[in-house]
Amino acid sequence: MNVVRERVSEGRPRIGMPRALMFYRYYPFLKALLEGFGCEVVASPPTNLRIMGMGTDLCVDDVCVAVKALFGHVRYLEGKVDYMLIPRLVSVEKKEYDTFTCPKLIAAPDMVRFSFPQLPPPLEFVVDVSKVPWWWGCLRLGRRLGVPLRGIARAYAAATREQRRFEALQREGLLPADALKRMENGNGLPSPGYASADRDVTVAVVGHPYLLGDSLVNKRLIHWLDSSGARVLASTMLSPRELEVEARKLPDLSWSYEWELLAASSHFLEKEGVDGLIYLTSFGCGPDSLVTEMVRREVPNPHKRAIMDLVLDEHSAESGVRTRAEAFVDLLRHRKTARPPGVLTR
């Protein structure tokens, strides 16, 4: 703690935030919080081939592509910042049964610490809502940085406002990366066309924010669906209330973010106007491998809508994703225009 306070007294510490994993969910909150603490936030750039290559070289083969991207972003920030902030997300909700996040989110700070021995110790920011409120982690982080209680309260209030703004932009039809751009560059940016209601086919894409938001990881899936003339809806566009309504119909899941994807799938499979669903996941993701099966076996699909599982890793080719996206949209168009079986025309 003393080391951090000494750096604060010398000037604004530069806090690195890798653009991976839950960056696409909590970055506006954490950025506003740290800036309220008097820090300078340095985010790594969008994932490119060099960053992904560095992460792949540093990681074991077994982990998912999202963790490999995290390692690449940490390597990019190495030597450019004073500290690294990688949240430890243990539990993000309080229910009558135990809840927790994916093991990779819980262990992310440890994986980075043991894989990058030359890095300064990561700033500890723990979220374990099953035991203590969300603000407790913010309080501990602020005290570690030597911020007085009044300053922590002001920074927390500002961070909460920024997070609500970020979530509101997604409810309006923006993907996480586009919502972040809108917040950084102002409202002058034109709205992307992928959510336009005048398309003849609507595709719902369900996946974690770090898969939907990282165009290199998802191989520009949204772009290829959009260029095929499809309207694209995403699970990140749904409100907590919409997800909770669907979750009541489904089996309980202790994985916090996975039950959201299960509920989003249920919502889209019953929603009027949705023609097909793509479940986007990364190879090696244990929780998602279960949820994809639950979507097919336990989620009602009253309209018999087409479902495509799209599994990605660092070796996936963009041309392959483009082909599958275009073929899926063509399939949905054909299903809408083909006459029902057994109907004869004169």
Image (spheres, grey):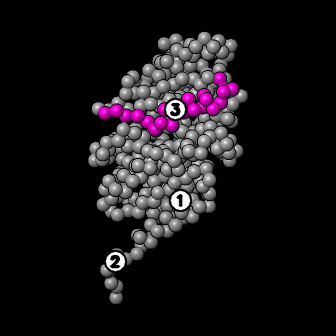
Residue 301 relative to residue 141: left or right: left
Seen at 46% across and 38% down, the residue is 102
For the N terminus, give its image quadrant: top right
Which of the marked residues, 3 or 1, is nearer the chain's N terminus?
A: 3
The amino acid on which the numbered mark 1 sits, given as a three-letter code, is Leu
Front-most of residues 197 and 329:
329
3 or 2: mark nearer the eye: 3
Which of the marked residues, 2 or 1, is nearer the chain's N terminus?
A: 1
The amino acid on which the numbered mark 2 sits, given as a three-letter code, is Pro
Seen at 70% across and 44% down, the residue is 50
Report the span colored magenta. Answer: 97-120
The amino acid on which the numbered mark 3 sits, given as a three-letter code, is Ala
Front-most of residues 128 and 221:
128
What residue is disc 3 on? 107
Q: Quadrant of residue 147?
A: top right
Front-most of residues 290 and 345:
290
For the C terminus, give its image quadrant: bottom left
Q: Quadrant of residue 40?
A: top right
Q: Is residue 43 magenta?
A: no
The label shown at residue 225 is: 1
> How busy is the neighbourhood of tag 3: few (under 14 within 10 Å), some, or many (20 plus)?
some
Determine if residue 156 is in view: no
The label shown at residue 341 is: 2
Which element carries disc 3, helix, strand or loop?
A: helix
Q: CA distance from mark 3 to mark 2?
A: 52 Å
Mark 2 touches mark 1? (CB < 8 Å): no
Q: Is residue 110 magenta?
A: yes
Q: Position of residue 293 (x, y in %)?
A: 39, 53
Residue 49 relative to residue 342: left or right: right
